[in-house]
Image (cartoon, rainbow, N blue to C red):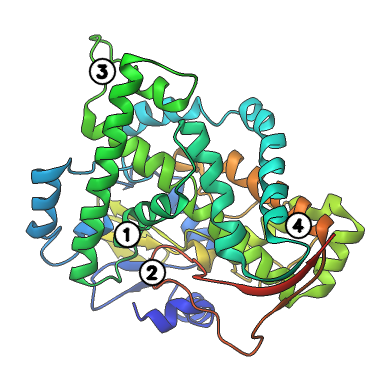
Amino acid sequence: MDPEVQACPYSLYQRLRREAPVYRMPETGFYLVTSFDLCRSIIRQPDLFISGVSPMALGSDGMPQEVLNIYENHGWVPMASCSTSDPPRHTRIRALLNKFFTTAKVRALTPYIEEIANDLLDDLGAAGECDFVKAFSHPLPMIVIARQLGVSTSNLDTFKAWSDAIVEPFGMMISRERELECARLVVEMQQFFKDEIDQRRENPRDDILSILALEKNDEGDFMPMDELLTVVTIDLLASGNETTTSGISSGMLKLIEQPDVFNALKETPGLIPKFVEEVLRLESPAQGMFREVTEDTTVGDVAFRKGDVLSLRFGAANRDEAAFHDADKIDLHREKAGNHLAFGVGRHHCVGAPLARQEMITSFQVLVSRIRRVALQKPDQAHKYTPSFFGRNLENLDISYELS
């Protein structure tokens, strides 16, 4: 839980896999699961290990009353997201979200994603310096999901602030003051989308917000506003950009650090999908997800009691030497390159995975084809990651570049 450890947790993950692949953290009481086989086995038993665990409620006092007051008095208390809920709600929400991320819909979006990527590079100019996160990896997925929702992309900084406010509390490393600030920002976001939803119910458009605003249950009633806002703000806007931003940022850093990989992709662009899978495996944007044990059971050599909480560390499992040859290296010819846990498995496999993969693939197709030269502005400076037990997000990536 130390931000310095989370900045580069891989040596600790390696030690845990070797000495204690199921380890109970004394300060939190929950268990870290770090081996690939154990994580995959647990994920494949979603009724024995349920997903309805909110990191924000794991503190000794649960969600602080001050935070609840902000939501109750000024907005709506967020419900569990699709990824942190269980049937029957999970089944219903996932079926709804699946409509937006079919293979056909993602394929139809691909030329648009390519256009955005080229536009972002055009805005940079042919040569110079920039923060790659701010200039490219953050705006690209944000523009894609915002336009799919049907909202203006004129103020991406506001959407970024709102999205961060949703995600940061899940990281379990923010101060109480920041937690309160995040709640206020989320309420601001809720009010914005409440107005948008009201407009869609009066005048529907050809966008996702209109589909959701008009969604009705079997009794003919609209979806409750707290649930609708959770789907829009957490399942779509935040989930639709934060992890993809992380993946694109991590991939660019890998290309800069490993010019042989960059040159191989330039020579053989058909290897880019494999590269994307390796980035997802090595720098899993979601480093871990929680599960709760529903009945006494045993995993590995460890006996669990009903109610125990596990943190499945995807970031550790995806570098497990027992599952992946040369686990810490990029292998552009790895067989079954997508056989990692970055998007989960089974019932809780990430519903937005097809779009996230395509955004990354298209981004690197454009980047590799147009970049002549790229380097870090300060190669000796350590990279700063947002302190988080959940995600792996570079705060900035200052580069110098030349484009064609």
Q: Quadrant of residue 280?
A: bottom right
Which-is-in-front pick, marks 3 and 1?
3
Counting residues from the N terminus, which is met first, the one under dot 4 or under dot 3?
Answer: 3
Mark 4 crowd level (few <14, some 14–19, many ≥20, 10 Å Cα): some
Give the Cα distance between marks 2 and 3: 36 Å
Give the Cα distance between marks 3 and 1: 29 Å
Tell whether 314 sits left or right of 289.
right
- Amino acid on which the number 1 mark rests in the picture: Phe
Which-is-in-front pick, marks 2 and 4?
4
x and y, in percent, of residue 20 in the image? 43, 77
The residue shown at (68%, 66%) is 252
Element at badge 4? Answer: helix
Element at badge 3? Answer: loop
The residue pinned by badge 1 equals: 170
Answer whether residue 197 is visible to the viewer in this image.
Answer: yes
Give the Cα distance between marks 4 and 1: 31 Å
The residue pinned by badge 3 equals: 222
x and y, in percent, of residue 323 in the image? 63, 63
Element at badge 2? Answer: loop
